[in-house]
Amino acid sequence: MEAPNNPDFWNQAARTREFTHPLDRERLTRLLPRDAVILDYGCGQGRLTGELIELGYVNVLGLDTSAEMIRIARDRVPDAGFAETDGARIPCGDASIDAVLLFTVLTCIASDDAQKNLLGEIKRILRPHGLLVISDYPLQADARNLQRYEEFQHELGGWGRFRLPGGAVLRHHSREWFDRLLADFAIDTSVELDAKTMNGNPARILQLWGRKK
């Protein structure tokens, strides 16, 4: 599995950026009992992990490849468990997790194969019919994003990939790609929302709720 690229960028982002994709708390609490084992993969500074603790969930683990993200998360949410991961393998046993949150992680992984490997790992650790919640970026239609898709498509090997000024390569996704990537999951809810990027720019996001087949 590929770690999010440019670790120096993400360590700096931990100190300067905020991540704001919303969690549908009502839906989550309806689907998961409070003793569910939940993995917040790509937990960043621990915002979602903290929300889960506030909701009364007691078995929550946050993982991230950025050491600085994990340091901040431990300071902000001392009641949760956090660990740094190298991105090669999720350090959880087979069929040991009830639910995985994957918020703005796929956008940080540029290659098809690396995304497939990540979803394969998630399938491995989820229990039968385990819950997967994804919040990420579909292809955007505004002029700013279309311009950078055009600028970087040949260098980075596909429409929707682009490089930030700090060097990190990000990716937005077609709905067809989401369908292919999630073929082993039964997606029962798909919601598009208005949100902001970590740089404060407006964006459309896609939230998918599904179960391991």
Image (cartoon, grey):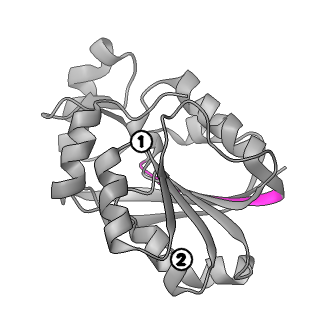
Amino acid type at mark 1: Thr
Q: Is residue 198 left or right of residue 3?
A: left
Image spot of residue 136 (x, y percent): 45, 52
Q: Position of residue 187 (x, y in %)?
A: 72, 55
Residue 52: mark in rendering? 2
Residue 42 at x, y = what percent? Answer: 46, 50
Secondary structure of residue under mark 2: helix
Where 131 sits versus 141, above or below?
below
Q: Residue at x 50, y 71 (%)?
A: 80
Indicate which label's residue lies in the foreground, 1 or 2.
Answer: 1
Q: Is residue 5 found left or right of 63 in the rendered image? A: left
Camera-side residue of 151 and 124: 124
Magenta residue check for 132: yes
Circle number at residue 65:
1
- The stretch in magenta equals 129-137
Rate crowding at label 1 as few (under 14), some (14 to 19) or many (20 or more) other CA atoms within 10 Å: many
Residue 61 lies, with reference to residue 114, above or below; the image says below
Q: Label 1 vs label 2: CA separation?
A: 20 Å
Q: Nearer the viewer, residue 146 or 182?
A: 182
